[in-house]
Amino acid sequence: MLRIEENERLTRVGPGTPMGALLRRYWHPVAATVELDDRPVKPVKVLGESLVLFRDRQGRLGLIDDTCPHRRVSFLYGVPEEEGLRCCYHGWMFDRTGRCREMPAEAPDSTFKDRVRITAYPVLELGGLVFAYLGPQPVPLLPRWDLLAMDHVWRDIGVTVIPCNWLQCMENSVDPVHTEWLHGHYYNYVLQRKAEQDERGDRFVARVIPHHVKIGFDVFEYGIIKRRVREGGSEADAEWRIGHPILFPNILRVGWTLQIRVPMDDTHTWHLMYQVYPVPPGAEPTQEKIPVYDIPLRDESGRHITDFVLGQDMAAWVTQGPIAKRELERLGESDKGIILYRRLLQEQLAIVEQGGDPMNVFRDPQQNTSLQIPVEWDLVETARAGRLSSGQAPYSRLQDMVEEAWAREPEIPAG
């Protein structure tokens, strides 16, 4: 368990908090690029700050305070122009740096606009996502994780606003044994109940997840590697030999998927299911647009939807409460991954408080060309023999596998 003050230190993310200071050292996705196509102004809540993301008429992105400093009107109704975003109320216009460019009602020779600035943050696009950096100067490089930087793949992005603290989502990722219960026994219960209630009388097919006989965790260059041996398996299996990576501080890598948990504020998390696929046979190697879609949290009655893996995880996260009361928990030997992750958070917090760069803050462009992550899913290992990394040669050796991969459509392993 954690003391109340320790829990506060790890969960509060607003300006001036210890965890807020750590998380502000990282780039966070705040939108899918395609979201700005129809509406070029989007409200953004990240790390306790209310902002607006916009694309000006030159196609450049800006992220600024969501309120005009003149009469406190929302910039959500601002008008994108060539040099910035114009307030709908009196026409004050601010550029991407937060500098006021125009005050139409003031005298032409007035210098008032030169003395007015608002909060603004740098933004960059990568892999169909818009990332923002809310931290101190100098700005680090946007990490080019392999799935974000790959060429010649297809992608889609599923998003959900989850009404709980970000840490509940992340601790789930260093808890391997929950998979056999939540995604095995409970999943079977849900599917069996659906089959019993289905007028068509669909047969129930049990989902079997073998029992964990051994789990292990290692801190590696980019975060934590989670390992497991299930009944009938051995340490020669990829699940133990290669393992299952968590990228510090808030990304789970599962096969060809990134689950990114963006803290909106202390009690809300923007969850992204960022999925990468081999190009379907005969399709164009590059998507015109990377689609984004909502992943539902609850049904029409308000109950959690738990007939799919992520829905089960989300129900587990949310029902712990807005911020889990970790002073009341009782951890056992099977929770050693959670203990390790909390220890790593504390260590990285201390580094920031001492003025250093925490884990996964990149400043060397040569180091950041394409960050390759070891994963246990064998299709990824095979694909790496080909062209999936940005800048590599065409993957002719993978092409003969693509039809098989799309025909199989193997389920992404649960976290």
Image: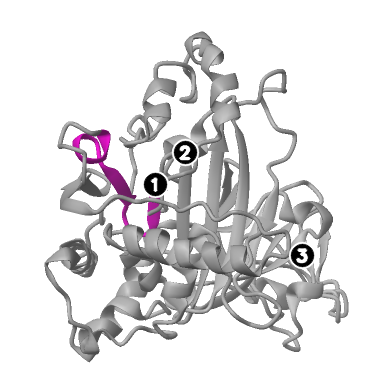
- Mark 3 vs 1: CB contact within 8 A: no
Task: Tell me the crowding category of disc 2: few under 14, some 14 to 19, or many 20 or more residues within 10 angstroms, Cα based.
Answer: some
- Left or right, 221 with respect to 111, comes to left
Q: Which residue is mark 2?
A: 256
- Per the image, label 2 sits on a secondary structure element best described as loop
Q: Earlier in the sequence, mark 3 or mark 1?
A: 3
Note whether 412 is above or below 168 in the view shown. Answer: above
Q: Which residue is mark 1?
A: 253
- Left or right, 142 with respect to 301, comes to left
Q: Residue furthest top?
A: 396
- Per the image, label 1 sits on a secondary structure element best described as strand
> Real-space Cα distance between discs 2 and 1?
7 Å
Quadrant location of the N terminus in the rendered image: bottom left
> Real-space Cα distance between discs 3 and 1?
36 Å
Report which quarter residue 106 is drawn in: bottom right
- Left or right, 153 with respect to 101, comes to left
Residue type indicated by callout 1:
Arg
Numbered tag placed on residue 85 in the rendering: 3
Q: Which residues are magenta?
A: 238-252
Is residue 304 a member of the stretch shown in magenta? Answer: no
Report which quarter residue 357 is drawn in: bottom left
Question: Residue at coordinates 67% horizontally, 20% vertically from top-left?
Answer: 281
Residue type indicated by callout 2:
Trp
